[in-house]
Amino acid sequence: MNAIVERLRGFWFEPAPAARLAMLRILVGAFVVGYLIPQQDNLLDVAQSDRQLYAPVGVVFHGPVGVELFQWLMRGTIVAAVCLTLGLWHRFTGPVCAALALWLFCYRHSWNKLYHSDNVVVFHLIVLGLSRSADALSLDAWMRHWRRPGPTAAAPASRYGWPVRLMCALIVSTYFLAAVAKLAGPLGLGWMSGENLRSQMAIDCIRKEVLGGQPNEMAYALYDYLPLFTVLAVASLSLEFLAPVALFHRRLGVIWSVNTFLMHWGIYFIMNITFHYQLWGLIFAPFFRIERLLELPRRLRRRRAKAETPAADGAPGLATSPQAANLVKG
Amino acid sequence: MISMMGPAGNPTEREESALEARRENRWGGLLSVAMLGAVFWPIQQNWREDPKDSFPLSYYPMFSQKREASENFYYVVGRDAGDGRYFIPRKWIGPGGQNQVRKQMRRMIDEGRASDLARSVAKRLAGQKDEPWSRIVSVAVVSGQYAMNDFFHGKKEPASEKILGSRKVKRKKS
């Protein structure tokens, strides 16, 4: 038993570079800023809906708030998200951003419609806000270095590893729960026949049309191909149900992420449903060594430098490849 | 000796750093257990008679409902003086995206407020100057039954339709 606990501990608290968590902070924070800024009018409209439609969810235990207060809280969330992205005064702004975003998203969902694509964004913000995600690539780190010059790179540590692991676990948990809901639902395994998925697409299409939207041409083109929906249903349920496996092996995590990312694009093309966080691929970023993106410019420079050196390599005695050596010998 | 002490410096610093790491791991463990426990908590809704979804803790029931060959839809229909029929776009029904408008409309209908909804849509349309909305003389909140196979094979009319509330569009004479 102790050995299992130790293995689990070793797995969960595996050291990771500070830059990985920092990159996640920047990506998720920038996404939230880019998502909220253009949504302000829409959020304001929703917050001014008929009060009788109000049904608070999550951390919202109060009645509707005044429009002015809502605007302040919305702007405060955006400012806090900007601070999180920049890593500015993270010990304070991180938790504040997590709390404000949690409230704002809950309040937005308190008007009789739940958007299941927003859940993971909020979970990720909470993890990033409550962990040491600003130890690198942040204004805090820059100011620390400015006050006390010294080595800047923080050594890989478990404090940067567990938040990434938790972010991955939260992702796979939500997909797994979606699979359980389908299997525990009235259709059970029969959901994989694809008929229900096709009906879902058809209903979505009719709903759009009766609410004055444009007909979804893709839905009309695909409706008669039931076997296609069977394949899609089997594939999507498998991806959801087997999601937890992705947590335990890095490569499996990458493969699962790519396939699930493609699934979301499939949903977008067939049903025109936009899950922004998923379609941008940002939800899957914790499964990748994204800190390597930082090395990309240096690698490109090195490759370019290598490509420019053959003239020097061509000199006798400097041949590096066997063919070149033969040429020199010849 | 120095190399054995590693980057943390002298033994006291090393101990402090180990202590801090332990403290942070304890926090990490607590937060992980709390968050994952919370995320999995709603799973029980799957086996409840009257399951309730929430945010951000959800049991993710989307796409799991059983769908029938024929389904009921709520929408708003406008008519012009020549009895021409138009689906009223959601932007005049309520704020938010398609699903939000649909859910809000459904709730109002369930609460017996279809006429209120028709009145608010008629009021919004009264100010419209663009065709064809400027020609609409009345709006009706309806419940329509659509057969999916028929709909996708060209028969776009509902199998049945019931008016739940209606209102005339009153325009100011210019």
Image: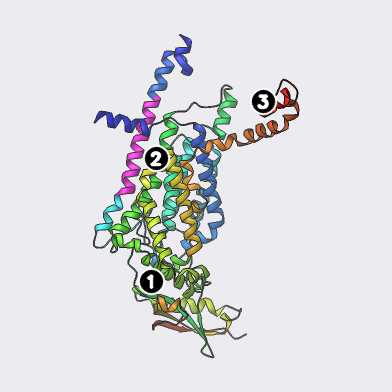
Q: In the image, residue B72 lies at what x, y percent? A: 37, 75
Q: Mark 2 belongs to which amino acid?
A: Leu
The residue that disc 3 covers is: A320
Pointer 1 chain: B
Indicate the colouring scheme. Answer: rainbow
Could you say which is closer to the camera, residue A122 or residue A247? A247
Which quarter of the rendering shows the N terminus of chain A? top left
Task: State which mark lies toward you, 3 or 2.
Answer: 3
The chain that hosts pointer 3 is A
- Would you say residue A100 sits in the magenta stretch? no
Q: Residues within 10 Å of mark 1 (few under 14, many from 20)?
A: some
Q: Which range is magenta?
A: B20-40
**Image quadrant where residue B106 sits:** bottom left
Q: Residues within 10 Å of mark 3 (few under 14, many from 20)?
A: few
Q: Are marks 1 and 3 in contact (CB under 8 Å)?
A: no
Query: In the structure shown, which secondary structural element does the residue marked by tag 3 occupy?
Result: loop
Name the residue rendered at 62%, 33% in the picture.
A299
- Compared to B70, does A7 lie above or below? above
Q: Is residue A45 visible?
A: no
| Depth check, front residue: A111 or B49 | B49
Residue occupied by mark 1? B106
Query: Mark 2: which secondary structure?
Result: helix
Residue A166 marker: 2
